[in-house]
Image (cartoon, rainbow, N blue to C red):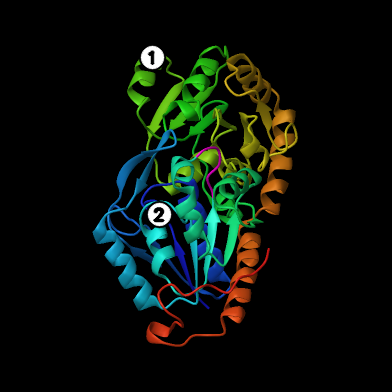
Amino acid sequence: MRIGLVCPYTLSRPGGVQGQVLGLARSLRRLDQDVRVLGPCDGAPPEPGIIALGNSVPIEANGSVAALAPDPAAQLRVLRALWDESFDVVNLHEPFAPGPTSTTLLIERAPIVGTFHAAGTSASYRYLAPLLRHFAERLAVRVAVSKDARTLAASALGGSYLTLFNGVEIERFVAAVPSPTEAPTVLFLGRHEPRKGLGLLLEAFAGLDLDARLWVGGDGPATTELRDRYDHDRRITWLGRITEDQKLQRLRGADVFCAPSLGGESFGVVLLEAMAAGTAVVASDLPGYRNAARPDVDALLVTPGDVAALRSALRGVLVDPGRRAALVAAGAGRAASMSMDHLAERYLEIFDGLQRAHGGRSGPGGRSGGWFRRRPRITP
């Protein structure tokens, strides 16, 4: 089967949606499927099998910044790629994000599966819901990565949704060479903005009277202010923006991964990645993170924004090897149950059903029907 996976965000930078799209493509290929990933790339594609659609531009949305490609040149590349590739089925991740996914939704004639990742609030859903509901009818199947993502999409668009977990590529994390450490080490990865809670983690860590280390990955609008405030603490290493391989190595090397986010997390796949890497997890007790981790089993989850609770949880895991080992063991089992290979099998079942319902190819470019032909529908 010829499958197209379309990502609205630049594939040149690590990100939750990007990681899911690329990982799903790799797992589907291991199932002998012919897969292409379409998405923006700021430079050369990061791996084979990607059709680059041009550079991205940063756009502020829902309290964060997304690297999207809404420009006309990128949309022309989308049109050309869809015609040339003649997909049997197309999977759009965040179908209504400006750029490649929304363009594909408008013009692609193969069956379309829409995967919804976002949770919390959405300005576009709030103001454009009636229009988006109309175009959502072009989706043959709607998938949400969590209950919270399903709630957001359904409230704006209506319709029925399959809920499929985000997946993690276990083998890549197990095989990574751990970064060396000098003492028990905590790792943070994420954009340096208030929503991700880095300032809270730094405050909590500053109050730890332990011989420990903190690795801070990523950057963002708060980087300069936070570095200036905590630059005196030599236990802290500022990594800056790191590559995917470096992320794997840091996750493998750290003793604790900390995700102190304040909200807006749909699933928390990075928690699963830490578990797959054999790293204990301390995180905020958010609905999205509970989709990935069971409280006090796979991870210690604390009240969002509570610096004292975060400091206490970090201390407990860092000084108690037995507690840390129990979290690691439970987390490894949790990650294995949500592997990317399992997820790919679920998606392939959906794609196979659509291909059978679609009745094969015909017409120009190997597709049947007109530009806005209604899709065959599978009832979840």
> Residue 120 magenta-drawn?
yes
What's the residue at 74%, 31% (across, down)?
296
Front in this rendered view, residue 362 or 90: 362
Task: Describe the element under mark 1 as helix, strand or loop.
Answer: helix
Please identify the quarter of the rendering in which residue 131 is found: bottom left
Local secondary structure at mark 2: loop
Q: Would you name the residue on which mark 1 appears?
A: 229
The residue pinned by badge 2 equals 8
Range covered by the magenta-colored residues: 117-121
Assign the magenta stretch its main secondary structure. loop
Residue 163, percent across and down? 66, 54
**Amino acid bearing label 2:** Pro
Q: Relative to residue 229, is residue 280 depicted above or below?
A: below
On the picture, is 115 further left or further right than 317? left
Q: Which amino acid does label 1 sit on?
A: Arg
Q: Can residue 277 be seen here?
A: no
Give percent across and percent down for residue 23.
52, 58
Answer whether residue 10 is magenta in the image. no
